[in-house]
Image (spheres, rainbow, N blue to C red):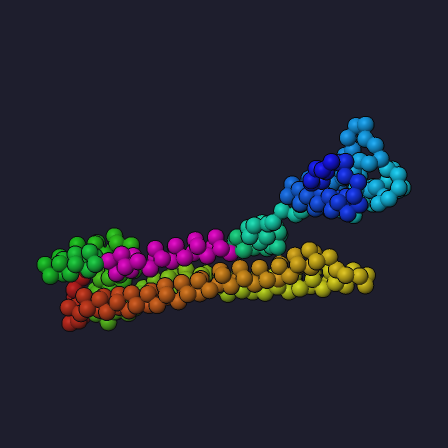
Amino acid sequence: MRKPSGCAYGETSGLRAMLCSAALLALAAALAAALGDLHPSAAVAQQPAGGGGDEFDPGAAPAGGGQPAAGAGDGQAAGGAPAAPGTAPKKKKNLLQWVGEALGIQFSVIFLALSFSAVALFVMNLLAARRDNIVPIALVESFEAHLNEKRYQEAYELAKSDESFLGHVLSAGLAKLRDGYEKAIEAMQEVGEEENMKLEHKLSYLALIGTISPMAGLYGTVWGMIAAFDTLATTGGGAPDPEVLAGNISTALFTTLLGLMIAIPVIAAYNILRNRVQRLVLEVGILSEGLMSRFENVGGAKKA
Protein backbone atom coordinates (compact mmCIF):
# COMPACT_ATOMS: atom_id res chain seq x y z
CA MET A 1 0.00 0.00 0.00
CA ARG A 2 1.36 3.45 -0.94
CA LYS A 3 2.15 5.76 1.95
CA PRO A 4 0.74 9.30 1.89
CA SER A 5 3.30 12.00 1.15
CA GLY A 6 4.02 14.99 3.40
CA CYS A 7 4.49 15.41 7.11
CA ALA A 8 1.70 13.18 8.32
CA TYR A 9 1.37 12.37 11.97
CA GLY A 10 1.56 8.64 11.15
CA GLU A 11 5.07 8.80 9.70
CA THR A 12 7.55 6.46 11.36
CA SER A 13 10.62 7.33 9.31
CA GLY A 14 13.29 9.03 11.42
CA LEU A 15 14.51 11.26 8.61
CA ARG A 16 11.04 12.60 7.82
CA ALA A 17 10.37 13.19 11.50
CA MET A 18 13.51 15.34 11.79
CA LEU A 19 12.63 17.30 8.64
CA CYS A 20 9.07 17.94 9.82
CA SER A 21 10.34 19.02 13.23
CA ALA A 22 12.75 21.51 11.70
CA ALA A 23 10.03 22.90 9.41
CA LEU A 24 7.58 23.39 12.27
CA LEU A 25 10.19 25.05 14.46
CA ALA A 26 11.16 27.43 11.64
CA LEU A 27 7.50 28.28 11.09
CA ALA A 28 7.02 28.95 14.81
CA ALA A 29 10.08 31.20 14.93
CA ALA A 30 8.84 33.19 11.94
CA LEU A 31 5.41 33.67 13.50
CA ALA A 32 6.95 34.74 16.81
CA ALA A 33 9.16 37.27 15.08
CA ALA A 34 6.24 38.63 13.07
CA LEU A 35 3.71 38.90 15.86
CA GLY A 36 6.12 39.65 18.69
CA ASP A 37 3.81 38.48 21.42
CA LEU A 38 3.77 34.71 20.99
CA HIS A 39 4.78 32.64 23.98
CA PRO A 40 7.79 30.37 23.35
CA SER A 41 5.70 27.32 24.18
CA ALA A 42 3.47 28.07 21.16
CA ALA A 43 6.27 26.81 18.92
CA VAL A 44 5.85 23.24 20.27
CA ALA A 45 3.36 21.13 18.34
CA GLN A 46 0.51 19.86 20.47
CA GLN A 47 -0.28 16.15 20.50
CA PRO A 48 -3.78 15.19 19.45
CA ALA A 49 -6.04 13.50 21.92
CA GLY A 50 -5.66 9.77 22.16
CA GLY A 51 -2.19 9.77 20.59
CA GLY A 52 0.18 6.83 20.77
CA GLY A 53 3.86 6.19 20.57
CA ASP A 54 3.99 6.62 16.80
CA GLU A 55 2.62 10.17 16.90
CA PHE A 56 4.91 13.04 15.94
CA ASP A 57 6.58 14.80 18.87
CA PRO A 58 9.49 17.21 18.41
CA GLY A 59 10.96 16.04 21.71
CA ALA A 60 10.61 12.29 21.02
CA ALA A 61 13.65 10.01 20.94
CA PRO A 62 14.71 8.94 17.41
CA ALA A 63 14.24 5.26 18.27
CA GLY A 64 12.43 3.29 20.91
CA GLY A 65 9.26 4.12 22.81
CA GLY A 66 6.90 6.94 22.06
CA GLN A 67 7.60 8.88 25.27
CA PRO A 68 9.99 11.85 25.02
CA ALA A 69 13.19 11.89 27.00
CA ALA A 70 13.15 13.70 30.33
CA GLY A 71 13.49 17.46 29.80
CA ALA A 72 13.82 17.07 26.04
CA GLY A 73 10.56 18.80 25.22
CA ASP A 74 11.37 21.78 27.44
CA GLY A 75 14.82 22.13 26.02
CA GLN A 76 13.52 22.02 22.47
CA ALA A 77 10.96 24.69 23.21
CA ALA A 78 13.52 26.87 24.87
CA GLY A 79 16.10 26.38 22.16
CA GLY A 80 13.88 26.33 19.09
CA ALA A 81 11.63 29.34 19.68
CA PRO A 82 12.90 32.85 20.33
CA ALA A 83 12.82 33.97 23.93
CA ALA A 84 10.27 36.56 24.93
CA PRO A 85 11.83 39.97 25.49
CA GLY A 86 12.36 40.87 29.12
CA THR A 87 11.39 44.49 28.64
CA ALA A 88 9.32 46.32 26.05
CA PRO A 89 11.37 48.10 23.35
CA LYS A 90 11.91 51.80 24.03
CA LYS A 91 9.92 54.22 21.97
CA LYS A 92 12.04 56.40 19.73
CA LYS A 93 12.14 60.01 20.89
CA ASN A 94 11.44 62.82 18.52
CA LEU A 95 13.79 65.77 18.25
CA LEU A 96 11.72 68.04 20.51
CA GLN A 97 11.66 65.49 23.33
CA TRP A 98 15.36 64.87 22.93
CA VAL A 99 16.20 68.56 23.11
CA GLY A 100 13.87 69.11 26.09
CA GLU A 101 15.40 66.28 28.10
CA ALA A 102 18.93 67.38 27.22
CA LEU A 103 18.36 71.00 28.23
CA GLY A 104 16.27 70.40 31.33
CA ILE A 105 14.35 73.14 33.13
CA GLN A 106 17.39 75.31 33.82
CA PHE A 107 18.69 75.74 30.27
CA SER A 108 15.21 75.67 28.73
CA VAL A 109 14.24 78.75 30.75
CA ILE A 110 17.54 80.50 29.92
CA PHE A 111 17.32 80.00 26.17
CA LEU A 112 13.59 80.70 25.99
CA ALA A 113 14.16 83.99 27.81
CA LEU A 114 17.04 84.90 25.49
CA SER A 115 15.10 84.02 22.34
CA PHE A 116 11.93 85.89 23.35
CA SER A 117 13.99 88.92 24.40
CA ALA A 118 15.88 88.86 21.11
CA VAL A 119 12.65 88.78 19.08
CA ALA A 120 11.08 91.59 21.13
CA LEU A 121 14.18 93.79 20.86
CA PHE A 122 14.49 93.14 17.15
CA VAL A 123 10.88 94.18 16.51
CA MET A 124 11.26 97.27 18.72
CA ASN A 125 14.44 98.42 16.97
CA LEU A 126 13.03 97.60 13.55
CA LEU A 127 10.05 99.87 14.21
CA ALA A 128 12.32 102.58 15.64
CA ALA A 129 14.59 102.46 12.57
CA ARG A 130 11.78 103.15 10.11
CA ARG A 131 12.16 106.21 7.92
CA ASP A 132 8.84 107.61 9.16
CA ASN A 133 10.21 107.65 12.71
CA ILE A 134 13.51 109.31 11.79
CA VAL A 135 13.15 111.25 8.54
CA PRO A 136 9.47 111.48 7.58
CA ILE A 137 9.13 112.79 4.05
CA ALA A 138 5.77 114.42 4.82
CA LEU A 139 7.37 116.55 7.54
CA VAL A 140 10.15 117.68 5.23
CA GLU A 141 7.72 118.76 2.52
CA SER A 142 5.31 120.54 4.90
CA PHE A 143 8.11 122.24 6.85
CA GLU A 144 9.75 123.50 3.66
CA ALA A 145 6.40 124.73 2.35
CA HIS A 146 5.86 126.79 5.54
CA LEU A 147 9.34 128.28 5.29
CA ASN A 148 8.83 129.23 1.63
CA GLU A 149 5.65 131.05 2.61
CA LYS A 150 7.46 132.70 5.57
CA ARG A 151 5.10 131.13 8.07
CA TYR A 152 7.76 130.46 10.62
CA GLN A 153 5.48 130.04 13.62
CA GLU A 154 3.47 127.37 11.81
CA ALA A 155 6.70 125.67 10.80
CA TYR A 156 7.86 125.66 14.41
CA GLU A 157 4.55 124.25 15.69
CA LEU A 158 4.59 121.59 12.96
CA ALA A 159 8.10 120.46 13.91
CA LYS A 160 7.36 120.58 17.65
CA SER A 161 4.21 118.45 17.30
CA ASP A 162 6.09 115.81 15.30
CA GLU A 163 7.64 113.02 17.41
CA SER A 164 10.22 112.02 14.84
CA PHE A 165 13.98 112.49 15.05
CA LEU A 166 13.91 115.25 12.45
CA GLY A 167 10.98 117.00 14.14
CA HIS A 168 12.89 117.27 17.44
CA VAL A 169 15.98 118.61 15.67
CA LEU A 170 14.10 121.23 13.64
CA SER A 171 12.03 122.43 16.60
CA ALA A 172 15.20 122.83 18.70
CA GLY A 173 16.85 124.84 15.92
CA LEU A 174 13.90 127.16 15.42
CA ALA A 175 13.56 127.68 19.17
CA LYS A 176 17.18 128.92 19.39
CA LEU A 177 17.08 130.95 16.19
CA ARG A 178 16.37 134.13 18.11
CA ASP A 179 19.88 133.86 19.58
CA GLY A 180 21.48 133.57 16.15
CA TYR A 181 22.13 131.01 13.49
CA GLU A 182 25.18 129.53 15.24
CA LYS A 183 23.20 128.93 18.43
CA ALA A 184 20.44 127.30 16.43
CA ILE A 185 22.93 124.92 14.77
CA GLU A 186 24.45 124.05 18.15
CA ALA A 187 21.01 123.31 19.60
CA MET A 188 20.20 121.10 16.63
CA GLN A 189 23.46 119.20 17.05
CA GLU A 190 22.84 118.65 20.76
CA VAL A 191 19.34 117.33 20.19
CA GLY A 192 20.61 115.20 17.31
CA GLU A 193 23.25 113.61 19.51
CA GLU A 194 20.70 112.98 22.23
CA GLU A 195 18.24 111.32 19.84
CA ASN A 196 21.04 109.32 18.27
CA MET A 197 22.10 108.11 21.72
CA LYS A 198 18.53 106.91 22.39
CA LEU A 199 18.55 104.85 19.21
CA GLU A 200 22.00 103.43 19.97
CA HIS A 201 20.87 102.64 23.50
CA LYS A 202 17.99 100.53 22.20
CA LEU A 203 20.29 98.75 19.78
CA SER A 204 22.82 98.02 22.51
CA TYR A 205 20.37 95.63 24.19
CA LEU A 206 20.18 93.65 20.98
CA ALA A 207 23.97 93.47 20.92
CA LEU A 208 23.90 92.36 24.55
CA ILE A 209 21.68 89.38 23.67
CA GLY A 210 24.07 88.49 20.87
CA THR A 211 26.96 88.51 23.34
CA ILE A 212 25.24 86.65 26.18
CA SER A 213 23.79 83.82 24.06
CA PRO A 214 27.07 82.09 23.11
CA MET A 215 28.32 82.57 26.68
CA ALA A 216 25.21 80.78 27.95
CA GLY A 217 25.91 78.04 25.42
CA LEU A 218 29.49 77.76 26.67
CA TYR A 219 28.20 77.55 30.22
CA GLY A 220 25.97 74.65 29.19
CA THR A 221 28.87 72.97 27.44
CA VAL A 222 31.03 73.07 30.56
CA TRP A 223 28.08 71.90 32.66
CA GLY A 224 27.41 68.93 30.39
CA MET A 225 31.05 67.86 30.22
CA ILE A 226 31.40 68.03 34.00
CA ALA A 227 28.29 65.85 34.32
CA ALA A 228 29.70 63.39 31.75
CA PHE A 229 33.00 63.03 33.60
CA ASP A 230 31.10 62.70 36.86
CA THR A 231 29.15 59.81 35.32
CA LEU A 232 32.41 58.16 34.29
CA ALA A 233 33.99 58.73 37.70
CA THR A 234 31.09 57.33 39.74
CA THR A 235 30.68 54.02 37.90
CA GLY A 236 33.02 52.23 40.32
CA GLY A 237 35.27 50.80 37.62
CA GLY A 238 32.41 49.32 35.60
CA ALA A 239 31.01 50.45 32.28
CA PRO A 240 29.00 53.70 32.58
CA ASP A 241 25.33 53.80 31.69
CA PRO A 242 25.38 54.80 28.00
CA GLU A 243 22.00 56.50 28.24
CA VAL A 244 23.12 58.76 31.11
CA LEU A 245 26.42 59.52 29.40
CA ALA A 246 24.68 60.33 26.14
CA GLY A 247 22.32 62.67 28.01
CA ASN A 248 25.27 64.57 29.53
CA ILE A 249 26.96 64.96 26.16
CA SER A 250 23.66 66.01 24.58
CA THR A 251 23.37 68.77 27.17
CA ALA A 252 26.84 70.03 26.28
CA LEU A 253 26.17 70.01 22.54
CA PHE A 254 22.60 71.31 22.46
CA THR A 255 23.39 74.28 24.70
CA THR A 256 26.26 75.26 22.42
CA LEU A 257 24.05 74.85 19.36
CA LEU A 258 21.18 76.94 20.76
CA GLY A 259 23.54 79.65 21.95
CA LEU A 260 24.96 80.00 18.45
CA MET A 261 21.52 79.76 16.83
CA ILE A 262 20.38 82.76 18.88
CA ALA A 263 23.61 84.78 18.67
CA ILE A 264 24.28 84.56 14.92
CA PRO A 265 21.00 86.11 13.66
CA VAL A 266 20.92 88.61 16.54
CA ILE A 267 24.41 89.92 15.77
CA ALA A 268 23.56 90.10 12.07
CA ALA A 269 20.34 92.02 12.82
CA TYR A 270 22.18 94.38 15.15
CA ASN A 271 24.74 95.35 12.53
CA ILE A 272 22.13 95.76 9.80
CA LEU A 273 19.90 97.97 11.97
CA ARG A 274 22.88 99.95 13.26
CA ASN A 275 24.04 100.76 9.74
CA ARG A 276 20.51 101.79 8.79
CA VAL A 277 20.18 104.06 11.82
CA GLN A 278 23.52 105.71 11.12
CA ARG A 279 22.55 106.35 7.51
CA LEU A 280 19.22 107.89 8.51
CA VAL A 281 20.84 110.00 11.23
CA LEU A 282 23.29 111.36 8.68
CA GLU A 283 20.35 112.16 6.42
CA VAL A 284 18.69 114.04 9.29
CA GLY A 285 21.80 116.18 9.72
CA ILE A 286 22.00 117.00 6.03
CA LEU A 287 18.29 117.83 5.68
CA SER A 288 18.06 119.88 8.87
CA GLU A 289 21.07 122.03 7.99
CA GLY A 290 19.76 122.45 4.47
CA LEU A 291 16.35 123.61 5.72
CA MET A 292 17.87 125.98 8.26
CA SER A 293 20.48 127.39 5.88
CA ARG A 294 18.10 130.14 4.77
CA PHE A 295 18.50 131.67 8.27
CA GLU A 296 22.27 131.81 7.97
CA ASN A 297 22.31 135.61 7.96
CA VAL A 298 20.03 135.92 10.94
CA GLY A 299 21.86 137.53 13.83
CA GLY A 300 19.23 137.31 16.53
CA ALA A 301 16.43 139.39 15.02
CA LYS A 302 14.52 136.56 13.42
CA LYS A 303 12.19 134.75 15.75
CA ALA A 304 10.46 131.44 15.25
Question: Observer-nearest residue: 80 or 22?
Answer: 22
Q: Residue at x 15, y 72 (%)?
A: 297
Q: Which part of the image, by quadrant, shows the C terminus?
A: bottom left
Residue 72 coordinates in the image, percent (x, y): 85, 43
Number of numbered tags placed on the structure image: 0
Q: In the image, residue 1 lies at what x, y percent?
A: 73, 36
Q: Going by the image, does 254 lie left or right of 184? A: right
Q: Is residue 4 above or below residue 294?
A: above
Q: Is residue 126 magenta?
A: yes
The residue at the far front in this view is: 1
Residue 132 lies, in percent from the top left, at: 27, 56
Image: magenta residue range = 114-136
Instruction: Tell me if residue 64 comes above or below residue 148 in the rendering.
Output: above
Q: Position of residue 233 (x, y in %)?
A: 77, 63
Q: Depth check: 168 or 226 in front?
A: 226
Which residue appears at 48% of the width and 52% of the height?
116
Prevalent SS, magenta region? helix
Q: Quick check: 135 above or below 98? A: below
Q: Is residue 252 left or right of residue 83?
A: left
Give the answer, above or below, for where 254 lies relative to 183.
above
Q: Residue at left 77%, top 30%?
A: 48
Q: Is residue 110 visible?
A: yes
